[in-house]
Structure formats: C-alpha cells, structure tokens
Amino acid sequence: MKLQGSNILITGGSLGIGKETAKCLVDAGAEVGITGRDASRLNVAAAYSGAFPIVADVTKSEDIDRTYQEFLAHAGGLDVLINNAGLGAFPTLLDATLDQYEQIFRTNVFGPALMAQKAAGIFINQQSGTIINIGSTASLRGFERGGIYAASKFALRAMTESWQHELRKHSIRVMQVNPSEVATAFNSEERIERIAADNKLRSQEIAYMIKSILELDDRAMIPEFSVWASNPWKQ
Ligand SMILES: NC(=O)c1ccc[n+]([C@@H]2O[C@H](COP(=O)([O-])OP(=O)(O)OC[C@H]3O[C@@H](n4cnc5c(N)ncnc54)[C@H](OP(=O)(O)O)[C@@H]3O)[C@@H](O)[C@H]2O)c1
C-alpha cells in the first residue's frame, strides 16, 4: 500500500514502539492517530510524532467507540489499525492474582479484539485494510513468570490467525509482529523510557519493520514475523 495519504490508527502511541511507529509513518506521509490513557504523555508524543492524539483506554468499550468517532471525524477514513497498546505483569503462578489476569487480558486481548472488530466492519465494507497486532516472542513460548503475559500474547496470536482466515477473502491483511526485548518504558511503574545499549533493540527497529510490511504491494502480506536483537549477550 502507499503510505502517503493513508489513514492509520495506533493504540498506545504515547511511548515506546507505538510512539516511534507513529513518527515513522507520519514521516512517510500518513495521517496517524495515537491513543493512550495519560493526556499529558500523549500530547508530548503527538508533538514529537505529528500524530493526532486521542485520550482513550483500550480496556473501556465506550473509549473504543469514541476513539473511532474522533479518528474518523479527523481523518475521514481508516486504512490501517495497529493494535499496539499492551501491558505486562510477571508474577509466579503462586503469586498471581485474578486482578492481574483481568487487567492484562483486558489490555492485551479484549481491547485489541474490540478495536479490530470495529476496524473489520470498515474494512469489509471497503474490501481493503490492514490490521497489525503487536505480539511478542512471548506469543510463541512460555517462560518462568510468563503465565499471565505469555498467555495473553498466545491469545492475541490465536486471534491473529483466526482473523486471517475470516478476513483474507475480503482482501484484508492481518499481520502479527513479535518483538523480542525492546528498550522502552514497558513494565516500568514510572513510565520512563529506557535507553537501548548498542546491542539491544530500540523501538525504531520495530517501527521500520512495521513500515516495511505496510509498504508491501497490496497483493502480498506477511502473516507473522519476529524481530530479535542480533547479539543481546555482547558485553
Ligand atoms: N518492550 C518490549 O520489550 C516488548 C517486547 C515484545 C512486545 N512488546 C509489546 O509491544 C507493545 C508496546 O510496548 P512498549 O514496549 O512500547 O511499551 P510502553 O513503552 O509501556 O508503551 C505502551 C503504550 O501503550 C499505552 N497503553 C497502555 N495501556 C493502555 C490502555 N489500556 N489503553 C490505551 N493505551 C494504553 C501506553 O500509554 P499510557 O500508559 O499513557 O496509557 C503507552 O503509550 C505492547 O503490546 C508490548 O506487549 C514489547
């Protein structure tokens, strides 16, 4: 697809991967909307990226409705949804609480599902569109203390595959990106972005890959791929 003049909605665009992806896509000529819960963080990110800010919590269905109203009123249409907003919690099985399961699944699974449901309505109508789900290498394998986070990302992957089967016949591309560890504010209470060491992934690498798969001709799609740091052990 051509990014110039396209309309792209990114959840969780105030920090990290979402923020850099917004900047990368705005620089390529797209009209981009970003969401996030914290208005001041979101406005700083909007000024940085040139994206249109929509203060909205992906765990609230009324916020999802308003996200689409505000985005469509601003942009006039939708070509791409990027389900990026996500949270982590890494307790052991013995320490995990129902509240943690609920919060992570509302953010990483139910929110993306409801966002995609609305996008799919638009995309089926126009017989075109792209949904990108930001999974994780935790979508592919469990690990110690991963019982909540990895389960949520496995669930997202299952939705990606299922939506591919449902939507491909409408010329809608559904793709999943699975980053390995990226230096961001992910899982930090203070929400302060970490600086990447030379051998660690930055948000820019993920943004570049998202831009690249979007720029593929409409006849092609990448169902899923991972992004690893080349040598994360290097001292
Ligand atoms: N960083 C990594 O190592 C890594 C690796 C693999 C996959 N991922 C995935 O990549 C995605 C982005 O992560 P990141 O590293 O960029 O994290 P981040 O720096 O913590 O950014 C997360 C973004 O999502 C927003 N957000 C969180 N909860 C939200 C909600 N309920 N509604 C709307 N926005 C919400 C945050 O803004 P507010 O807090 O203001 O709402 C922020 O803009 C996530 O899905 C994550 O699981 C990250």
Image (cartoon, rainbow, N blue to C red):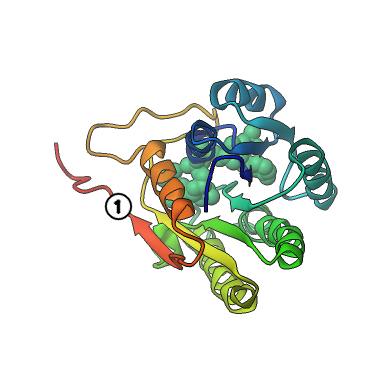
Residue ID at (59%, 79%): 165
Q: Compared to 37, does 211 lie above or below?
A: below
**Pick the front one: 3 or 130:** 3
Residue tagged by mark 1? 228
Residue ID at (65%, 73%): 170
What is the x, y in percent for residue 186?
Answer: 49, 40
Helix, strand or loop status at disc 1 = loop
Residue that protrudes farthest toward the left in the picture:
235
Residue 49: tell me if it is visible.
yes
For the C terminus, the quadrant is: top left
Location of residue 163 by image quarter: bottom right
Left or right: 65, with 5 as reference point: right
Q: What amino acid does circle 1 point to?
A: Trp
Location of residue 138 by image quarter: bottom left
What is the x, y in percent for residue 125?
Answer: 76, 65
Q: Compared to 160, does 22 lie above or below?
A: above
Residue 10: tell me if it is visible.
no
Q: Compared to 52, does 214 lie above or below?
A: below
What is the x, y in percent for residue 102?
Answer: 68, 57
**Pick the front one: 128 or 88:** 128
What is the x, y in percent for residue 174?
Answer: 55, 65
Residue ID at (50%, 39%): 21
